[in-house]
Image (spheres, coloured by chain):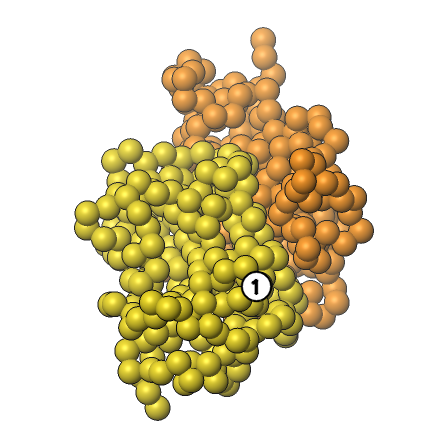
Amino acid sequence: MTMNKIFQNCDVAVADISDGATIMVGGFGSYGGLPINLIVALSRQVAKDLTLIANMGGVGYELSHRIKPGGYQDSGILFENGQVKKFIGSVPALGGMPPTSPLEKLFNEGKVEIETVPQGTLAERIRCGAGGLGGFYTPAGVGTIVEEDKEKKVIDGREYILERPLTADFALIKAHKADSLGNLVYRQTARCFNPVMAMAARVTIVEVDELVPTGQLNPEVIVTPHIYVNRIVEVPR
Amino acid sequence: MKERLNEQTIALRAAREFADGMVVNLGYGMPGLCANFIPEDRTVFFQSENGMLGYGNLAADEEKDYELMNASDQPVTPLPGMCFFDSAAAFDMIRGGHIDIVVLGAYQVSEKGDLANWGRPGRPATGMGGGMDLAIGAKKAIVTMLHTTKDGQPRIVRECTYPLTARGCVSLIITDLSVIEVSGDRLLLKEIAPGWTVPEVQVLTGANLKPARDLKEMEL
């Protein structure tokens, strides 16, 4: 008998996320790929002093209408609530948007810390964390502020900087379908950061459009193997 | 005031650089417009940092699917043969030299091809996104931008004063006034917008331009 990973709703699935936890939030930028219902559930509970690792800081509900008619919630709500002390990601705020996203406002008031990481470096740091590696050398960021305080190395005549792994206590993930075991498939560009984050957290929580019985997913197209997934919530969109 | 090219026309000119079969990544903002100007006789495979290769035009309102977006958060259309992968794999492609051309926007480009395209005064919370990885990883980096800032300051400069994306990475600059090649430590003026003269463009440029021997009017 395998452990039951299926949770009845998102609130129950995120209930034990507590103060000071490090959370990876899947997705890329806007709507597609964001675990919106898990984010909203986290915003309804009391955990604070969180460290958030995500590609983008979220535009917040108000600006989201510029991206998708009707708007949507994103990580912005967690900043609005004052639940986050530090953000790690490649696009804390979008330069093409007004400076009114919840994260940017909070940062300008000195109330949140930001670590800005080149996007490819972010993905690879998470993959290193997932795969038990101590880091990697990348040419991205050489000669820029990104190289400050980092070990540099010349390999075959090219300059690289050492980047370290990232892991998390929890990952909040969006997938298209899960089977009962926790195998995942994604839909189109909603895949993005979700598979690497699913592999890099102690507890990975996924919201899916559809939950199917084990054996119903074609083993050839499964992207995330079930051992990386701890909790599944079905939220039809 | 003389007429300058609009953003659509700059994108059209940039898209002429795409050869048949190339893999091309389009940066945030104006570069995204290039997807709509592929010369008819060519197939170009657009790659996107969120994990997509081989997408089509920007989607019209009635066909928008918000799980089929480019890296600028714009819905696009599917094409036969397109494929999806995760962000880590997308950046293996990018850093690993598998992208033929990246088209990036910029705040400043220096005469040595240094690029500044992510941070500007008053907006300390904006980030570089995938720009640093793309600038060092693509075989060729093209910048499309307006020649000057809103208040008339040159964006092509001797040294960048804005935070750098990468050093010496830009090889071609396409603006509303000109096409400029970065060759070694000098800027070669290759093409000039209709109705403009070399001295007029030079005055709006913060570094020395060397007119190419085959300097011509931009063909649009």
Q: What residue do we see at 19% from left, 47% from top? A: B41
Vertical placement of B178 versus A44: above or below? below
- Given the current orientation, which residue lies at the most extreme top position? A1
Q: Mark 1: which secondary structure?
A: loop
Whole-percent x, y for residue A86 in the image: 72, 53
Tell me where residue A128 sits by quadrant. top right
Q: Which chain is yellow?
A: B
Q: What residue do we see at 54% from left, 41% from top? A: B95
Report which residue position mark 1 lands on.
Answer: B185
Could you say which is closer to the camera, residue A153 or residue A68?
A: A153
Quadrant where the C terminus of chain B sits is bottom left
Quadrant where the N terminus of chain B sits is bottom left
Q: Which chain is orange?
A: A
Crowdedness of circle 1 by 10 Å Cα count: few (<14), some, many (20+)? Answer: few
Q: What residue do we see at 33% from left, 87% from top? A: B2
Vertical placement of B72 versus A41: above or below? below
Q: What residue do we see at 68% from left, 55% from top? A: A143
In the image, is B133 to the left or to the right of A162? left
Vertical placement of B46 versus B13: above or below? above
